[in-house]
Image: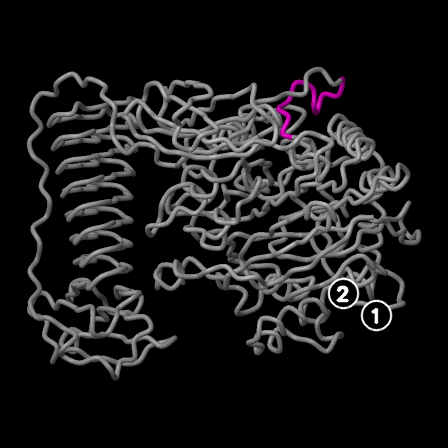
Amino acid sequence: MALIFGTPGNDLLAGTPADDEIFGLSGDDTLFGQAGNDTLLGNQGNDFLFGGVGNDLLWGGKGEDRIFGDRGNDTLHGNQGNDSINGNDGDDVIYGGKGNDTLRGGKGNDRLFGDDGDDYLYGDLGSDTLTGGLGRDVFAIATRSGGSSLADADVITDFTLGEDRIFLQDGLRFQNLQITAGANNSAVLRDSASGHFIAILLGVNPTLLSEQNFLGDAPTPSPVVPPVRPPIPTPTPTPPPNTLVNGIASGDTTQTSTVLWTRSLQTGSVTFEYSTDPSFSAIAGTRSATITDPQAPVKAEVTGLTPGTQYYYRVTDAAGDTAIGQFRTPAELGFSRGLRFGVSGDLQGELAPFVSIRNAPDRNLDFFVQMGDMVEMDSESPALPGVTQAKTLAEFRTKQAEIYSERFGLNPWADLRATTSVYATWDDHELTNDFAGGATPATSPQKQDIFRNDPNATAPFVNETQVFLQALQAFQEYFPVEDRSYGNTGDPRTANKQELYRYQTFGSDAAIYVLDVRSFRDRPLPFTPEIAYQPGDPLPQAIETALTNAFDPNRTMLGAAQLNQFQQDLLAAEQNGVTWKFVMSTVPMQNFGIPVIGERWEGYAAERTELLKFIEDNNIRNVVFVTGDFHGSVVNNVTYQEGFGQPQIATGVFDVMIGPVAIQLTVPFLPAPFNQTFAAPFGPATIGFTPPDLLTQQGKSQAKYLALTDRAAKDQYVREVLDYRAATLLGYEPIGLENLPNAQLLQGEYLAVHTYGWSEFEITPGTQQLRVTTYGVAPYTQADLLANSTAITSLQPEIVSQFVVNPV
């Protein structure tokens, strides 16, 4: 792969037959990708970008650019300025960005997004999807752009009556159109002369369409024709502007140190300055790092800091692009100053921008925990069209970068990470669904046989395969975390492996423990389907077998090295007088019963019992598990058994399950409507996956659930389903902290499973009372976002649940 940079002048740059990255910098540049899957960035100036053969990614940057995809399935971004963009051959994705743009799909089934500005959108040949975005847009249609079936028609997702217009090309006239009602409140446009279905206007009442909404004989824009390529001068690397594309961040902050982070598109030196003065009149210190690959972020460790102090930092790259952030060092043991932090996880790039966390930067948090599944490597998203499982380092990096990139004018994660220091861990979707790092490559859950086909497929553990190491490398690169390893533990599953476990105290108010529950776990229990049976009946054999096997003492989730360190750190915090102990686990500690038991602590019951018994035997008080992965907020007491069939033993521990930021599911084998893509917080997912006969014996059904319109009623419905499954059938704790005398519910319920959002934990100085607040927005799908981006980006988080707990 070649990295090619222009100069501040007007450059003509050409790639190689391989996969190239070409940066035009300032000036009016001409960039040729040639063959290969290329990335072209015009940056400033009025640029011409020509992708050539291959699946290319083209960014116009600032200026009035002409962008030509040519052959292949290309992704084209106009960015700023009044741009002309042509996808040409292939199934292309085209974004106009800001400005009044002209977008042409060309041949193939294309997706066009006008974004901001008054745009012209031409689908051309193929079955295309056109989204105008903000502004007064014009959608061009013609008989040749349709076909004899409804599936051949172009889909216009956001036509706004009174603002947008439809241009009729190739002699098509309004009088020749048959306008009828389609499915789901849509208008269908058909040419009466040819019988071709031409367009479907989503969300438009066909009776409201009149000739005023149409313009005759749209001008056909001339296709972009690439100029003849003259001899290429030798490129001289020069810093591009506006290059800190994923923002800046700080993380792994201790009383005396932090890790500063950024990513720049420009190779060269990056400078990190830090100060206790927001004006930087006095610089406390400077660190530097070197960008050698624009896809790879850089980090700088800062030491010698003062505990309990607010710091500011300034990042400047070789292009001169600058950003300012802040972080706060924790107080030393013995000080009680109070604490406020946030937690969330579980999101997908296709649902960006992540409006459910948009209020977090304004909450004056001491830190935020990014709690796993912070990207979904095994689902398709706009950054990698057509890729449903990332497999290479380049793909892992691209997907990570997508989460921290601006979309529809918003970048909530970059905003949050600049204002608030983060701690982070990973879960399965940073690699592939349900993977187990301590299993063999042949036996771990995986998608597209990524472990079985790995160059290191004969390794004893998944955590030694190439694809695992590359996914872990991308995770380490895109988070402001230290690179740590276990050293020689004497256990081959952990020896000399990367260590993601973290322990950090915050004065005497709290300690956090960030667990890695993926890298060393044994393969999960085999899938056990839910089977309907009556309370008091003997357990079905399959369920009894699963619950028995969960107590196998040889199975581990954490690995001995991590478990031992975690236990010692719990004991140390209690002995040092730390009030609250927050355990960050990406999978729930509370019991939910048989569904996907292999994913949770419940499926590693022997180790779960060992850990909880250690907490109780050592009188370690005020332990709170903060967990994720199941896409909803559910709060419950934690109990344990010493073996299958033994009584439940109460503890002082409770579990606060959090998230998701934004998640959708497509599960074809589920009954309608859950077999279509749906917004999938824990509530609808629970109802969709619960067997109908199990719902029936509770007097419930999917139809009754779907008829509910009130969020609180839906939450209660799901709570009853969960309690029946776990408490009634298996004797577990019912959901909630009603049996905890030192807890009080202030708002909502102990279950909120129909929103996207995050949770805030606040400790009051003096009383040490813990307040837990969950914020949420209405859930949405990618289709919702593309159909009406303004409606989604206008969502504001609100409180959906709040409770307090006094320490013991």
Q: Are marks 1 and 2 in contact (CB under 8 Å)?
A: no
Q: Which residue is mark 1?
A: 534
| Vertical placement of residue 601 versus 217, above or below | above
Picture quadrant of residue 788? bottom left
| Vertical placement of residue 86 versus 417, above or below | below
Element under label 2?
A: helix
**Label 2 environment density (alpha carbons within 10 Å; few <14, some 14–19, many ≥20):** some
The quarter of the picture where the N terminus appears is top left
**Which amino acid does the dot numbered 2 rest on?**
Asp
Residue 209 position, x and y percent, is 21, 79
Q: Which residue is mark 2?
A: 723
**Which amino acid does the dot numbered 1 rest on?**
Gln
How many numbered discs, if any?
Answer: 2
Chain-order first, disc 1 or disc 2: 1
Residue at the (73%, 46%) spot, across then down: 766
Magenta span main SS: loop
| Vertical placement of residue 562 versus 676, above or below | above
Question: Label 1, label 2: how many angstroms apart (C-alpha)?
Answer: 14 Å
Dot in front, 1 or 2: 2
Residue 648 lies in magenta, yes or no? Answer: no
The answer to whether 304 appears left or right of 220 in the picture is right
The answer to whether 750 appears left or right of 466 in the picture is right
Say the numbered circle drawn on residue 686. Answer: none
* Camera sees residue 405: yes
The part of the chain drawn in magenta is: 490-500
Picture quadrant of residue 100? bottom left
Q: Nearer the viewer, residue 61 or 704?
A: 61
Picture quadrant of residue 252? top right
